[in-house]
Amino acid sequence: MGFARTYSVALVGITGHLVEVEADISAALPGFVLLGLPDTALSESKDRVRSGAKNTGLPLPQRKLTVNLTPATLPKRGSGFDLAMVVAALQAEGELEPSGPTVFLGEVGLDGSLRAIPGVLPAVKAALDAGHHRVVVPADNAEEAALVMGAEVSSFGCLAEVFTAFGAKEAGKLRHPAQSHSTANSKDTPEQALRPDMADIAGQSEGRLALEIAAAGGHHILFNGPPGSGKTMLAERLTSILPQLDDEAAMQVTALHSLCSTGSPRKELIRTPPFEAPHHTASSPAILGGGSGIPRPGSVSKAHRGVLFLDEAPEFRRQVLDSLRQPLESGQVVIDRAVASATYPARFQLVMASNPCPCGMNVGRGLDCTCTSRERRSYFGKLSGPLLDRIDLQLTVPKVTAAELAGAGSNESSESIRQRVTAARLAQAERLRTFGLLTNADTNGKILRGPLRLDAHLTGELNSAIDRGNLTARGFDRVLRTAWTLADLDGASTPTKDHIDLALYFRDLGKERLEHP
């Protein structure tokens, strides 16, 4: 009868917290008490670890076993504490040697096998940040855990292997599971899979240019046009011209997808910017994150450092669309629930596509359109002014002609466009280094009207647009952001009048002046 302590990690959002797993054995009637705000999956671990230890040949003591997960006020969920609990219990019984500051992560099967768990990458990083370098994980999580530099990862396939490694006194009696229960997918999809290419797009010179500007500066974009004009094709090819993620961004993205993963554990860092395209019936919790207990990440966080594409944007509920306004500005989403509050990164590029009306035929003179004016107003009314004010690039995508369709595949490839985008990103990163920013889309009015202030003769048209009420202060700054991106793409040290005019044109104000002089 005694006491022992091991360590594990609890994830609240993407942030990991070191948890002490305390086990105490007393002479009272047999029982298993689990303390420390466990959720349902964690409460069921009592039966999992008891059966797993018994079937391995080293059963838990037939006395009262109390396991406390401390800090007790921190909510805990999932099956990742199983391994730490069974090791602590057998150490308290004296069957295993003390493991010191080792952190244990893993789910225990009833036959004693170790199962992979989601969120291993952020959990290992949290353990390392807390000063615990040695981590024990299931074999299927070994490659993902090894992505954290500096961690000493030990991986095992079953409890028998763990007990042997930590000095089981009766190692000869240990039994291994009859067969492996690996959750790894034997048909892993390579990260650099064949992706859509910009050369596939027929025509759409303006759309291609707008997409290149968006990629170079990290800007948000709205495509409006009739069905079949190529809006979705353009949006799906944005990630093909974005630069690969650097180490910091790749670690963040991989940690998020590890937390959300229900399939194979990660084997390498995600270097390709993610692409998320939720259906228009998605709810606010699905887009922003949420759920019972500790909130889970939503589409905006899964698209972190990548692209969030809302096809048929006016079909989304207005509440869902307006909920994007805060993460578009802050680059993160804070989800408060009664049990816990979680903060997830959400710095994504928003791409929206819409038809000109519910029937999609309100183009040109609109003679084929069957929608009433009220239906058209209601359709676009879901795209609120404050949301559209945050979209830097707004353009109409026309129908593709037969000649353009015949020349599909002859346009510039994604690789050559990506080279210009990368060069532009390097230029703005160098210019914005003193402000701690990476892209023009991250700049604010204080910077644009301060250190990066342009001559008054260059911004005269923007000032007039503000005075006419056609441009807000936020819109003023966003036009300047786009102008700086155009200058970076041209290799210029500062925007010119042409750059500002083109930036204003892509905000739909310039086209209004051309059509209604």
Image: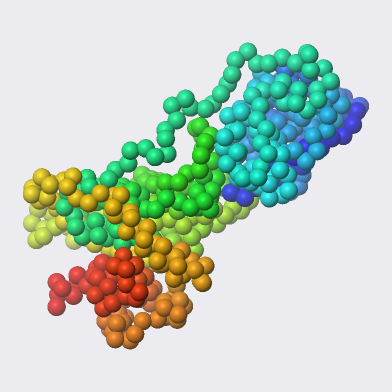
Protein image colouring: rainbow
Q: Residue furthest bottom?
A: 456
Residue at left offset 8%, top offset 56%: 367
Residue at left offset 77%, top offset 30%: 87
Q: Quadrant of the C terminus?
A: bottom left
Q: Where's residue 418, x and y in %?
A: 33, 54
For residue 155, above or below residue 313: above
Residue at left offset 27%, top offset 63%: 394
Toward which corner of the image does residue 278 lie, by quadrant?
Answer: top left
Q: Where's residue 410, x and y in %?
A: 17, 47
- Residue 19 visible in the displayed image: yes
Q: Where's residue 437, x and y in %?
A: 48, 66
Q: Nearer the viewer, residue 199 or 473?
A: 199
Q: Quadrant of the N terminus?
A: top right
Q: Is residue 28 left or right of residue 156?
A: right
For residue 112, above or below residue 499: above
Q: Is residue 460 left or right of residue 83?
A: left
Q: Nearer the viewer, residue 403 or 10?
A: 403
Q: Nearer the viewer, residue 243 or 70?
A: 243
Residue at left offset 27%, top offset 60%: 210
For residue 442, above or below residue 215: below
Toward which corner of the image does residue 144 lie, by quadrant?
Answer: top right
